[in-house]
Image: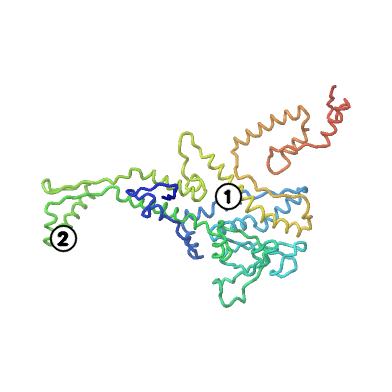
Amino acid sequence: MDKTHIDGWENVLTKLGTSSDRRTHAVPTSAPMWTEQSLDDAYTDPLIARIVDKPADEMTREWVAIHMEDEGRAKTITQDLEDLDAQAALADGLRWARLHGGSIVVMGLDDGKDPVEEVNAKGVRAVKYLTVLNRWQVEIAQRQEDPLVKGYGQPLVYRIRDEGTTTPGAADRTRDVLVHSSRVLRFDGIPTTERRKRQLGGWHDTIITRVYDAVRDYQQSWGGVAHLMTELGQAVIKLDNLASMLAGGQDDLVLQRLAYMDTARSIVNAIPLDAQHEDWERKATPITGVPEVLRELGVYLSAVTDMPATILLGISPGGLNATGESDTRHWYDWLRSQQVQRLVPPVGTLVGHLMQARSYDVKEDWSITPNPLWQPTEKERSETRKTDAEADAIHLQWNVLAPDEVASSAYSGDRYSSERHYDEERIKRLHEAEMEGEPDDAGVEFED
């Protein structure tokens, strides 16, 4: 007799592994198709607003640093970014991408060409403005349809809809504006599948899709606790022949008696009762275990949002000697990766146009790095400088660094730096002096 062996367990008494097993019928529900109105309504919830805003605000809080060989040029471009209010514009771009699934920042590039045409990167004379639009305010008008060309399937032209005709497919489109994709900085929402992207009109998903159920359960639980607080103590009054009085139509007498008890309690803080026929007591509602349940719901919500509970909910870290520093470090490490992937590239594009507008050589060696999010305390800064000073003393003693190199490395910028840079030519001269046994420029003589 041929038998087919299947790896698994089956128990007909508990229905484990059978067609009646309740676990086998638990499948993910279909993701909702949000509208602009429903997302705006969800954003009014303070917890959802924090989930949307916090990463975007933190990623841009300390902004970025521009590094060029000519520090004066770096300061000029930094000031240009500030004049454009680029920090706020890109923060909003990230924010609305998380909420709505996508956004664009339109760059007002003066290159002598129509906005629907590809930008003439070498002909940019000025960057006049930055305009932030969420994905409901624009639609993809044209895509790259050639599969043999870079960017196949990606948008080529966006259609910016007039505020009076925000419904896709509206008949009157005379006031709409077409903008080439090279003139915009695009921010995508939460990654999703290609099938769902097609359903969303070529955009990514909103963060609300992933966190809505967890936020709803958490908020409802807290709402239930708030309601429970109003019923922590329930008064129970026993009246003799209450059922008979109600059946006999003496409702007024019952209500009059209860009102008299309540009035007496409010005046003299005492309740007069018939010693033989009445009784009054307060029943307490137990809340044992409620704090633990709420905390576990908070842990789940933290996992779903990928935000530490100390930051998302303001919950103090639990456990002996817990400070929450490891959670914060992990959070900042995640933000750093997001900055590198989602903030630095658009800033780089914008900086390239600003350099061209200033007639700077765009091909020169320059870079952009996000400024550190972790800000040390004054005590930590002092300890760092003390450690650096001890290391500098050793470097000076062994001629690894010269005094002017230490000073220029540590204090040449706007902020103190622990990085040290040495003069290669000086080191080369020292090496040559050592080989010849002659004194170096600093007056140090090396012996054989």
> For the residue marked with disc 2, what is the amino acid?
Asp
Say which quarter of the image contains residue 185: bottom right
Q: Is residue 443 left or right of residue 45?
A: right
Residue 27 in percent (x, y) is at: 44, 56
- Taking depth in this image into account, of 259 and 117 the one nearest to the observer is 117
- Taking depth in this image into account, of 85 and 68 the one nearest to the observer is 68
Residue at point 65%, 46% (across, down): 371
Residue 212 in percent (x, y) is at: 46, 56
Residue 190 in percent (x, y) is at: 55, 56
> For the residue marked with disc 1, what is the amino acid?
Glu
For mark 1, what is the residue? 58
Of badges 1 and 2, the one in the foreground is: 1
Using the image, determine if residue 446 lies above or below residue 365.
above
Residue 386 in percent (x, y) is at: 66, 31
Q: Is residue 272 left or right of residue 32?
A: left
Say which quarter of the image contains residue 428: top right
Q: Residues within 10 Å of mark 2 (few under 14, many from 20)?
A: few
For mark 2, what is the residue? 252
Element at label 1? helix
Residue at point 65%, 57% (across, down): 86
- Taking depth in this image into account, of 379 and 158 the one nearest to the observer is 158
